[in-house]
Image (spheres, rainbow, N blue to C red):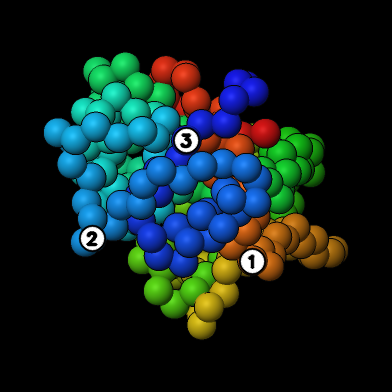
Amino acid sequence: MSTIKPKIALVGYGKMGKEVERTAVEMGFTITDIFEINNPINPENQYEFDVAIEFTTPESVVQNIEKISLLKKNIVVGTTGWYDRLDQVREIVEKSGIGLIYSPNFSVGIQIILKIIEEVSKILNQINNYDIIIEETHHRKKKDAPSGTALKIAEKILQNFKNKERIVTNPMELDSKSIQIASLRLGEVYGIHRVILDSEFDTLEISHTAKTRKGFAIGALLAAEFIFEKQGFYEFTL
């Protein structure tokens, strides 16, 4: 990781963009540009930033990546709900020769939870009598459901627990081979994720509750330091 902090552009200036701005100033980063609806990115302009941090909407994220790639600038993508277009974005990144890092959740705590889930899932192979449900709660304006974080947790389980083969969101489709994800949207909740393991004998819970948006902002800025002066397509992990 470079000892020189990259200059940052914010793409999207909603609540998350404003939190990244506040946290960046505290951590000694320089914000050179803020792009939003009234000030869009122009690929024909020249900008001073080194890394763009993108928190917008699933509908606009790929177009933003395309524009930033034309500027030959690196990107941190915090927007979720676009992962069905991962191959397209990877191609954009490779063709332009830039660096991009993305994550369904930049919280350091969530990264720890994912490590725990990975190990627990391996242990379950030796026991094989637990049902699993993932419950996620976010603010009512969140546009994707299930959340990218819940899907990532489910992916970790599927990769490591051989008895589970698929994800369902409809409880009527639940069987012994599936993992159910239940999505709730409520008020201004920053993010609550619970993994519940239930057997005939006991119930285990693994949970993470985000208290503020600052944890996501810190992770995004750590990712900006990582991707600075790199090429390639990365997913944020610890």
**Which residue is at 57% across, 74% downward?**
189
Mark 3 and mark 2: Cα distance apart in space: 21 Å
- Viewer-nearest residue: 103 or 16: 16
Amino acid type, residue under disc 3 in the picture: Lys
User: x%, y% of residue 106?
Assistant: 57, 47
Picture quarter with the C terminus: top right
Q: Which residue is mark 3?
A: 7
Q: Is residue 226 left or right of residue 87?
A: right
Contact check, label 1 and label 2, Cβ < 8 Å: no
**Mark number for residue 37?**
2
Instruction: Depth check: give the residue in front, 193 or 64.
Output: 64
**Location of residue 36 with respect to 234 vertically, above or below:** below
Amino acid, disc 1: Thr
Give the label, 3 or 2, closer to the camera.
3
First in sequence, mark 1 or 2: give its number.
2
Which-is-in-front pick, marks 1 and 2?
Answer: 2
Amino acid type indicated by mark 2: Ile
Q: Quadrant of residue 150?
A: bottom right
**In front of the other: label 3 or label 1?**
3
Indicate left or right for 149 with 113 as reference.
Answer: left
User: Residue 118: where, in percent of width, then height?
Assistant: 69, 38
- Secondary structure category for the residue under label 1: loop
User: Residue 212 got which mark?
Assistant: 1
The Cα–Cα distance between marks 3 and 1, rounded to whole angstroms, is: 24 Å
Q: Give the x, y percent position of residue 137.
A: 55, 70
Q: Quadrant of residue 194?
A: bottom right
Q: Secondary structure at mark 2?
A: loop
